[in-house]
Image: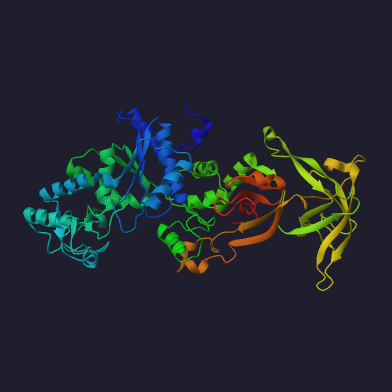
Amino acid sequence: MTTPAEEQKFDFIRELIANDLTAKNLPQGVVTRFPPEPNGYLHIGHAKSICLNFGVAQEFDGRCHLRFDDTNPSKEDDEYVESIKKDIAWLGWDWGEHLHFASDYFETLYQYAVTLIGQGKAYVDDLTQEEIRAGRGTLTSPGEESPYRGRSVAENLDLFGKMRAGEFSEGARVLRAKIDMTSGNLNMRDPVLYRIVDAPHHRTGTEWRIYPMYDFGHGQSDSIEGITHSLCTMEFEDHRPLYDWVLDSLGLYHPQQIEFARLNISYTILSKRKLLQLVQDGHVSGWDDPRMPTISGLRRRGYPPEAIRNFCDKIGIAKRPNTVELALLEHSARDYLNQHASRVLGVLRPLKVIIDNYPEGQSEELEGINNPESPEAGTRMVPFSGELYIEQDDFMEDPPSKYNRLAPGREVRLRYGYFITCINADKDPVTGEVTAIHCAYDPETRGGQSPDGRKVRGTIHWVSAAHSLPAVVRLYETLFSEEHPDDADDFLTVLNEDSLKVITGCQVEASLKDASPGDNFQFERLGYFCMDEVDSKPGALVFNRTVPLRDTWSR
């Protein structure tokens, strides 16, 4: 019996799998796989596929394999392999003993290609990549057969063996399937199965000089591993006939390929090629820049893995493409952090407050609530003294009528503290800028309660000047200024110049001296923040704002 949450996310893929199980077509159980290419870092779009593949396997008591499609050594690196493993584990998924690589099957895939040649279904072609592309035809015109298409089986076997032996240079020859140059599906017009790549492989070194194309290696790898449902995005729908043709031609066990719509998010680029360009051209600090939609970037910014998984559940699985509002991803983070993040006090742009009637040299500790949404989180003690810092925006000399914060003659409540009334302000004699404000406090209002029941118009946050810690805070906006950056002729022209603001000279409460990189907090009235896992160190605290307290920019 399914729970309400399970029923809510029951989609066409899960329905299909459930029907397969009912029909007893899966004696081995449900087996899925997540097959990333190790040529970049994973992004939030991959998170959707990860949660689908691992989630489906978990829900149906099956298993999910992690298999790296490492068939293009010129773009692959062990750095990417390790980052992908780290990201998937951080999201909470476990592939157990089922970690695989397409390179594990290179010899088997080669022998499959030899079998196709022996069947007369594959041939070695001497045409260049440009000539092959030009001869493929269009959607309205058939392709042209290669002049090398009629080579004998013996000649093809000989040439293919020499390709493997490294006797030809990169680009000199390829192995193509012999299917149908008049097919309405361009993927079936004698697609390339193998090409020569003159680059060392991150796992096999220089053992191989030829590498299978994705369309050739993917289906057989699925078959070898006993995958039951090969879940992929809609751009592979037109490739499914080739997936089926190869497996059927070789007489192999046949997994079922099912396509779903890829994830698109407003104000976001999810092209790995474009993300790589942002990194290489220095538009961001790296793959883990908190403005990047990579899983490592989201982690560094402070997005909890639970929030990303909840987001993937909310957007669901469909066949029709659509663009998800970035605000929904932010809401998922905010919703989770509201329940789990500890509240702390931090001041981003400090203005000194001197409490003239507070006993000189005295300090005390006030009780602060760690999380009002989770009573079990308890309380902490916050130091208080006669000199404080408040936000510059929380004081105005000549405020408008609806201004509810500190002003000359105005009384406000200090969070967890006392009522204070502004008396006057110190100013720079040259610039006229306010440098400090003088206040009086009411000692009868400790804890923010007035014994006479009088009301105040506002509550502001603060830190004790003698006890607070210096910090750097990074505020983030969208990396792109346009809602659909992919629609721009050049996506780099719509980069948001204000995507990052670095604020130095911030002050945060003393309890954060015990925080660890990666810890999440709500800076009261300011938003949710994460201690940066790369740059933050004892005595040099750096915080990244994950999301504001609410959606402050309309989509």
Q: Is residue 10 above or below residue 421?
A: above
* Residue beneath the point at 67% across and 46% down: 512
Which one is in front, 464 or 111?
464
Q: Is residue 13 visible?
A: yes
Q: Quadrant of the C terminus?
A: bottom right
Q: Is residue 117 left or right of residue 91?
A: left
Q: List x then y, in percent, for residue 224.
A: 25, 39
Residue at left offset 20%, top offset 56%: 190
Residue 343 is left or right of residue 383, and the answer is left
Give the vertical position of 235 relative to 104 (above or below): below
Determine the residue located farthest toward the bottom in the rendered image. 430
x, y percent for residue 314: 52, 43
Q: Position of residue 140 (x, y in %)?
A: 26, 63
- Dividing the picture into quarters, in which one does residue 403 lie? bottom right
Position of 51 with respect to 174 (left or right) is: right
Q: Residue at x 34, y 44 (%)?
A: 67
- Whether residue 319 can be seen here: no
213 vs 131, nearest the viewer: 213
User: What colouring does the structure picture have?
Assistant: rainbow
Residue 159 x, y percent position in the rendering: 12, 57
> At x 30% / y 56%, what residue is drawn?
73
- Residue found farthest to the right: 452
